[in-house]
């Protein structure tokens, strides 16, 4: 795998510089940790949680706190990401390839957050993750939603696709999972993101370098606007905690069990 195939490692430093304050990353981290808390609450001490594709480690750091009764391990393909994650999270972080999961052993819970869309054969990846789980183990994942929101940001991020709820549910079931919970989220952002994507012509004709320059602008923190959007998105954490389902959003969250 290469950067052009799955991710552009130049983005790691830019993301690491803003993700602890940027409204989108903050909301995403809260929502992920809320979902994880519900899953690990019933597990016996000593369980194993593996985050596959841990990136710069801002979620991994929170997982260590949430999963204080278990052993958390982070893994990423890129050494650049692992270097950032190892500084942030007080747990083992290794360089590893999701395409070769057998060497990583089995886990009680696997988390993979905004990773699947970077990989060409998502069904094969999910089947591999299924084999990595113990029987009855849980997979928690997030992916971007709706091809109607496709833009230069997807091009810059080396995405292969965005998902519908039906499509994600289908490939999870075909990969040996039973769906426990599936919802869209970031609902409050959908109208704004949809409008911006229409204005920017969807990014279909933008090459990677141009897309990367435009995407970098979206990582800029605008103080007042950032605070307002962060506040607007806080209510979705309660929704996820109660496992209610949102009808619309720019992302999808799934909790699935190995059959």
Image (cartoon, rainbow, N blue to C red):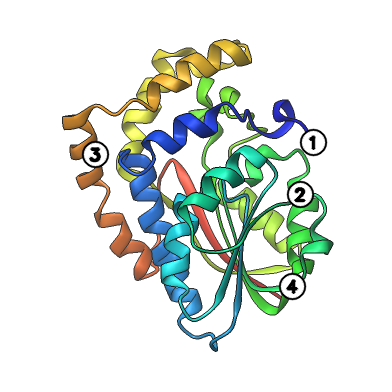
Label 4, label 2: how far apart the Cα atoms are: 15 Å
Provide the residue designation for mark 2: 97
Whether residues under marks 3 and 4 lie with C-beta atoms below 8 angstroms apart, the answer is: no
Neighbor class of circle 1 (other Cα within 10 Å; few <14, some 14-19, many 20+) is few
Provide the residue designation for mark 1: 1
Question: Where is residue 245 shown, x and y percent of the image?
Answer: 40, 61
Q: Which residue is at a point 45% across and 76% down the rendered structure image?
A: 68
Provide the residue designation for mark 4: 106
Label 1, label 2: how far apart the Cα atoms are: 9 Å
Q: Helix or strand or loop: what does disc 3 sit on?
A: helix
Please state which of residues 84 and 1 is positioned toward the viewer in this rendering: 84
Question: Where is residue 218 shown, x and y percent of the image?
Answer: 39, 25
Instruction: Indicate whether 157 appears above or below 43.
Output: above
Neighbor class of circle 4 (other Cα within 10 Å; few <14, some 14-19, many 20+) is many
Label 4, label 1: how far apart the Cα atoms are: 23 Å
Work out whether mark 1 precedes mark 3 in sequence or the reverse, and give the earlier one.
Answer: 1
């Amino acid at each position: 795998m290469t950067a052009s195939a799955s991710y552009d490692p130049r983005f790691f430093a830019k993301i690491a510089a803003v993700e602890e304050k940027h409204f989108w990353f903050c909301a995403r981290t809260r929502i992920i940790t809320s979902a994880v808390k519900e899953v690990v609450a019933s597990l016996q001490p000593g369980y194993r949680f593996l985050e596959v594709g841990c990136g710069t480690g801002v979620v991994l750091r929170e997982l260590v706190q949430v999963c204080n009764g278990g052993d958390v391990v982070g893994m990423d393909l890129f050494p650049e990401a692992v270097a950032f994650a190892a500084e942030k999270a007080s747990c083992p972080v290794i360089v590893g390839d999701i395409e070769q999961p057998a060497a990583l052993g089995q886990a009680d819970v696997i988390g993979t957050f905004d990773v699947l869309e970077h990989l060409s054969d998502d069904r094969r990846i999910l089947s591999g993750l299924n084999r990595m789980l113990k029987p009855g183990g849980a997979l928690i994942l997030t992916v971007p939603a709706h091809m109607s929101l496709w833009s230069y940001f997807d091009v810059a991020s080396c995405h292969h696709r965005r998902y519908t709820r039906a499509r994600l549910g289908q490939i999870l079931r075909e990969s040996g999972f039973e769906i426990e919970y599936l919802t869209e989220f970031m609902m409050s952002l959908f109208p704004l993101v949809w409008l911006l994507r229409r204005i920017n012509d969807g990014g279909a004709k933008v090459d990677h370098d141009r897309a990367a320059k435009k995407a970098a602008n979206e990582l800029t923190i605008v103080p007042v606007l950032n605070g307002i959007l962060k506040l607007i998105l806080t209510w979705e954490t309660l929704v996820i905690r109660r496992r209610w389902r949102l009808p619309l959003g720019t992302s999808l969250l799934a909790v699935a069990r190995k059959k």
